[in-house]
Amino acid sequence: MNAETYLARLHAPRPSAPTAEALRALTRAHLEQVPFENLEIFRERRCPSLEPEDLFRKVVEEGRGGYCFELNKLFYLLLRELGYDCYCPAARIPYRRPDPRPLSHRTIVVRAEGGRWLCDVGFGGPSPKGAMLLDAGEQVVEGERFSSRTEDGVLTVYRHDPDGVHPLTSFRDAPSPEVDFDVLNGYWGYHPGSVFTQKAVLYRCIPGGILSLKGDEFTVTRQGETVQSRQISGEEELASILRDSFGLALPRAAG
């Protein structure tokens, strides 16, 4: 792990100490500079490698993004290198789904200055757009309201939407073995029932908002309001969106 090169990718200075303030800045920088994207899975038809050197090459040296099993693993390794006490639980995403949800997500919990922080840089969509203090009750993170509660050893993060409070993600508050993430990555990166094999899914935070691409629909949201939404038609327009909005080149589709 070359921390200095990784920090340069984030446009972030090296913290002088593993403080909560620095953690918040690093998490937000990651969300703005490194997009959530599944193009390796969807277009190139490859399940991503989770080997640290492969992740570093893809995300840092090649300027790509990734999905949760990639981004949250790499960021976790950086945080450890910077002296943070952190661990990665496997999580379920029950958001707006009444049916039981499988384990499908890798997240990060960091202990800093007496508190536990959720620092998830590999979710996108409705997740907190910055570090969330899990011990603080209801709080606002980058203009959106969240809360958390632990019951029977399971920690659930709730998102407070205009139409009510919804469970967003849930996990046992303990580290999961790396081998579990290898198995989950194999399913979500290969299986035809995985959303990531079915369509392109990209997110990137911007000041005051978020950019998203799901299938052929590109959306710009600011202050919780959709300010632009359009259907993308053709490879040329897709390449332009990826380059200008996500900082990515269009990968060649698998033949």
Image (cartoon, grey):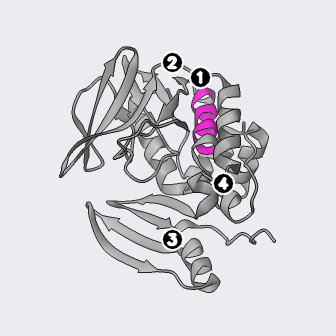
Give me the C-alpha separation between circle 1 and circle 2.
6 Å
Q: Which numbered circle lies on residue 192? A: 4
Residue 135 pos. (x, y %):
30, 22
Circle 1 or circle 4, nearest the eye: 4
The amino acid pointed to by label 1 is Ser
Give me the C-alpha separation between circle 3 and circle 4.
28 Å
Residue 8 pos. (x, y %):
61, 50
Question: Mark 2 or mark 4: which comes first in sequence?
Answer: 2
Quadrant in which residue 147 is drawn: top left
What span is in magenta?
A: 70-80
Regarding residue 48, the answer to whether it shows in the image is yes
The amino acid pointed to by label 4 is Pro
In the picture of the structure, the residue carrying the numbered disc 1 is 176
Give me the C-alpha separation between circle 1 and circle 4.
25 Å
Q: Residue at x 71, y 26 (%)?
A: 179
Q: Residue at x 61, y 35 (%)?
A: 78
Give me the C-alpha separation between circle 2 and circle 3.
36 Å
Residue 136 pos. (x, y %):
26, 26
In the picture of the structure, the residue carrying the numbered disc 2 is 174
Does residue 38 lie above or below 79 as drawn?
below
Q: Would you say the residues marked 1 and 2 are in contact, meaning their CB atoms lie under 8 Å apart?
A: yes
Question: Mark 3 or mark 4: which comes first in sequence?
Answer: 4
Based on the picture, tell me whether residue 107 belongs to the magenta stretch. Answer: no
Question: Mark 2 or mark 3: which comes first in sequence?
Answer: 2
For label 2, the crowd category at 10 Å Cα-Cα, with few meaning under 14, some 14 to 19 and many 20 or more, is some
108 horizontally vs 181: left or right: left
Circle 2 or circle 3, nearest the eye: 2
Residue 118 pos. (x, y %):
42, 32
Quadrant in which residue 43 is drawn: bottom right
Q: Which numbered circle lies on residue 245? A: 3
Based on the picture, tell me whether residue 77 belongs to the magenta stretch. Answer: yes
For label 1, the crowd category at 10 Å Cα-Cα, with few meaning under 14, some 14 to 19 and many 20 or more, is some
